[in-house]
Amino acid sequence: MSLTSSTLERYVDRISPVHALDARVKVLMTLGYILTLAFLPNGEWAALAGLAGLLWWGVWQARIGLGLVLRRAFVALPFALVAVSLVFARPGAPLFDLTIGPWQLTASDAGLIAFISVVIKSWLSVQAALMLIATTQVVDVFLALRAFRLPTVLVAVMAFAYRYLFVLIDEASRMLRARECRSAAHHGRRGGGSIGWRAAVVGQMVGTLFLRSYERSERIYVAMLSRGYRGEVRTLDTQPLDSRDRGTLIGVLATLALIIYAALVW
């Protein structure tokens, strides 16, 4: 897959009740959803099903397609598989034995439940984050973070990193096209030389990209200083939340609190 400037852009332009919500509300709901998953005890399948249904109902309301969110969320599953050690580390009733060289590992029922719970929680958390960025412009997310009084420097670094990451992708794409033009294929074989030659070329490209990025950052910084930049992007005053935003936020957070209360008490 070739690199393009839209590789990282995940916003889906739709007209929906979720898109119309204030970015601050959506950020708070996403954080509340992820925290609810984190504090939920392992093995609470009914609560996990309720949280999944709540999220998927929001995806349906946003009209971004459940299949799209599910496919993009699969990227988190390989990282969640790291928790497979829980199957053998948690004490509990033995299920089966696994011999690896001189070691013999015993899987337990409690470990298996913990592992499955971690995988499901990770998968749902990524889906919630994907729904946020699919229904909210990134600029609005940064403005919401500033409204929550996050450090100005932190928000500015994230905003500039996001803005110029697309520039770096375009720069890398041009360098890759230039390399392909200079490495012509012949007789059905790929262009270029040996693996060592390719590794050396990639190393030179990475170094060149770093130098170009450094020089570009210096020019941009000087240009911003000359235009009055003092460490903070100036925006219009944040508007207060209307009744619909407040009602949606209270309703969703109350539902999340009810789910975790039922899981902990009942």
Image: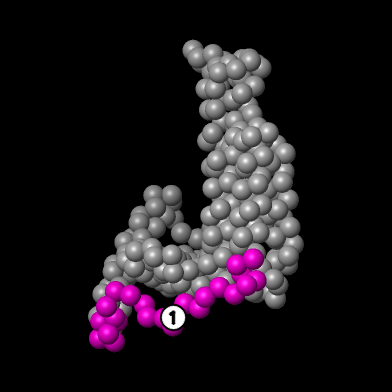
Residue designated by label 1: 237
Residue at x 65%, y 37% (from the top left corner): 263
Location of residue 30 with respect to 14 vertically, above or below: above
60 lies left or right of 156: right
| Residue drawn at the location 26% of the way across and 75% of the way down | 218
Residue positioned 68% across, 33% down in the render: 266
Q: Which secondary structure class fits the magenta region best?
A: loop
Identity, as a three-letter code, of the amino acid under mark 1? Asp
Horizontal and vertical percent for residue 59? 70, 61
Q: Position of residue 129 (x, y in %)?
A: 57, 57
Residue 75 seen in the current view: no
- Range shown magenta: 224-247
Q: Quadrant of residue 22?
A: bottom right
Residue 246 included in the magenta stretch of the image = yes
Residue 46 picture location, percent across and down: 72, 39
Camera-nearest residue between 50 and 119: 50
